[in-house]
Amino acid sequence: MSTKRAMAYHYSVTCFIYFLLLIPLLATLVYSLCDQWGATILPSGFTFKWYIQLWTDPRFLTALYHSMTLAVGTLILSAVLIVPCVFVVFYYYPKLDTGLNILTLLPFAIPPVVSSVGLLQLYSDYPLLLTGTPWILVGCYVGIALPFIYRAVNNNLRALNVHDLMDAARLLGASSTQAFFKLILPNIRKGLMASLFLSFSFLIGEFVFANLLAGANFETLQVYLYNMQQNSSHFTSALVISYFSITLILTLLATRFNR
Amino acid sequence: MNSVAISHLTKRFTEKTVFSDINLTIQDGEFFTLLGPSGCGKSTLLRCLAGLTQVDNGTIQLGEQDITHLAPQKRDIGMVFQSYALFPNLTVRENVAFGLRIQKLDTKQIKQRVDDILALVELGEFAERYPHSLSGGQRQRVALARSLVVRPKMLLLDEPLSALDARIRKHLRQQICAIQRELKLTTVFVTHDQEEALTMSDRIALMNEGKIIQCDPPEKLYIEPSSDFTARFMGQYNVLDADQAQQLFKESYQGSLAIRPESIYVFEDNRQYDERFSEKIAATVKSHQLLGSIIRYQLIANNVELTVDLLNRHAERLFDVGSELSILIDKSAMRHL
Ligand SMILES: Nc1ncnc2c1ncn2[C@@H]1O[C@H](COP(=O)(O)OP(=O)(O)O)[C@@H](O)[C@H]1O
Ligand SMILES: [Mg+2]
């Protein structure tokens, strides 16, 4: 009896917290779906017109395309650069791990507003004239993805008996490269994918660097959202819900694919 | 053919010399064991043979070939690790096939050889399982199959049984020996367990602190220890220094003396004792442990503590703590060190 009541209690607390977290989202959803919601308690008129307006706006579609390609491109580049690097440090130069560890903390330690000033200074001049182009964002975002990927890969490698596995593979005739691709990579795949999707949702939502470094020249979703503020708030609600749905769908796909 | 000659082998890590000037020869098809306490350098020596650790000096010859500086991939040496080191992302079949895939053999041939070797280690029905779903003993047999399937010239085993429980260990011990004899494979086995070494090996090299103390067949190593380290390590040998020996026998001795616990007898009235035996010595029982077929006593005789093993045969032979008895020592089985 008492366990049943305890269960009911746990259940209701969980539901309540879920509800609390969902309120803003639900409110935004309702708001994005109604024609007007001004002086009345209940909204008047149900409509898809904000969504239609949004999804037919070429500027929005361009921004979406920019954000997606930027995030995906960055993550591919990060994976190609960072995974072998973390492995080499872990396996061949374990002493460098402390340095790498500190390096991965820098993106968190320095506020984006500060580091973007530095990046602007560095890349606004010949020979590295990158400001205003997507390339400066790619470079900057690789730095942001670094801690996520480093943590995940490093933890996975620790859980794996890397030294014995590599030794066993070499004695069976495999080169270190073969052993890396056939044995190490498949075994860290799950953690790597998880960190890539985490970085993805982070990068899609990144605003400060996108606004300061590329701004109007290369409008991303977040910058577009910011620039649309003076528009109808029903419209921005539709934008927020669309943005949220895209991330949600991608994350769900990712977890399925990962199983 | 696949004999091994190790000469003047030396290995240093930055601040520590693990071993220096090791010389050994291992016969073709021999089951050779490196035995010694943990930390004495057995694994390092084995890894030097495999090429996983670079040597600082000396040479290793396998058959006709000098392999001292050859990459591990090119040595044709198989190795089994204490940690199994199975590839967790591959099934048993894929694990075993790994080496053959690297050699780019055709699929049919690979399947045939994998099936054969899995049958040899009695794991045919587990071929499609993943390592995490196997028991320790099964994992180690997969590791054994994986290193045998490529037909190495030599097999190295680094404490392969240490992580297993006692019953499985005994069974796998016999299985390893049977397979080794069948394939006539030159084998170097590393262990810190003297019983394991004694039961499995053709020859044992006893190591301590990077030195080879004695290298002999098991019977000889056990019965004729050449140093007190061997005597103490190989059994429950009573090792007495000259003073203690003199106290015990009331005659003067040079150097130390090793007495096996099973060569000390309790005096019985109706038995004849020939000149092999010492005089009767009075002793007191200090403690005893039942070890199954034998009972091990700690006795005090002339103020010298002795370990004595008696066969667990008659109930009336169980001496209580504090009992007074007379012992005789088989002097022909004593070793002067
Ligand atoms: N990679 C290494 N770096 C430094 N010292 C090592 C390394 N490997 C082993 N040693 C040292 O060498 C000695 C022998 O080790 P090992 O060969 O593993 O002993 P065993 O296998 O007999 O227990 C130990 O004192 C160990 O600390
Ligand atoms: Mg060892």
Image (spheres, coloured by chain):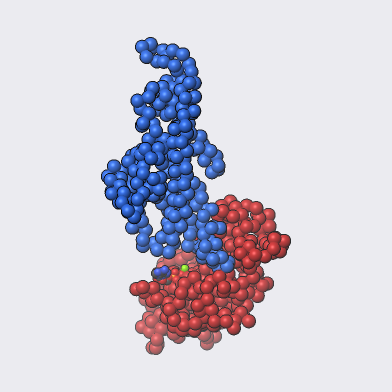
Chain colours: A blue, B red
Q: Residue at x 36, y 44 (%)?
A: A132
Give the answer, above or below, for where A119 lies relative to B2.
Answer: above
Q: Nearer the viewer, residue B250 or A212?
A: A212
Q: Nearer the viewer, residue B248 or A254?
A: A254
Q: Residue at x 50, y 47 (%)?
A: A190
Q: Residue furthest top?
A: A40
Where on the picture, by quarter, is residue B185?
Answer: bottom right
Q: Residue B292, image x and y in percent? A: 55, 64
Q: Residue B85, image x and y in percent? A: 53, 60
Compared across the picture, whether B322 is left or right of B218 comes to left
Q: Quadrant of the C terminus of chain B?
A: bottom left
Q: Residue A138, image x and y in percent? A: 41, 47
Compared across the picture, whether B204 is left or right of A19 comes to right
Q: Number of numbered discs present?
A: 0
Q: Nearer the viewer, residue B231 or B200?
A: B200
Compared across the picture, whether B175 is left or right of A75 comes to right
Q: Nearer the viewer, residue B274 or A222?
A: A222
Q: Residue at x 52, y 68 (%)?
A: B158
Can see residue B168? no
Give the answer, above or below, for where B19 lies relative to A103.
Answer: below
Q: Residue at x 49, y 74 (%)?
A: B48
Compared across the picture, whether A55 is left or right of A216 comes to right
Q: Residue A195, image x and y in percent? A: 45, 46
Can see residue A114? yes
Q: Quadrant of the N terminus of chain B?
A: bottom right
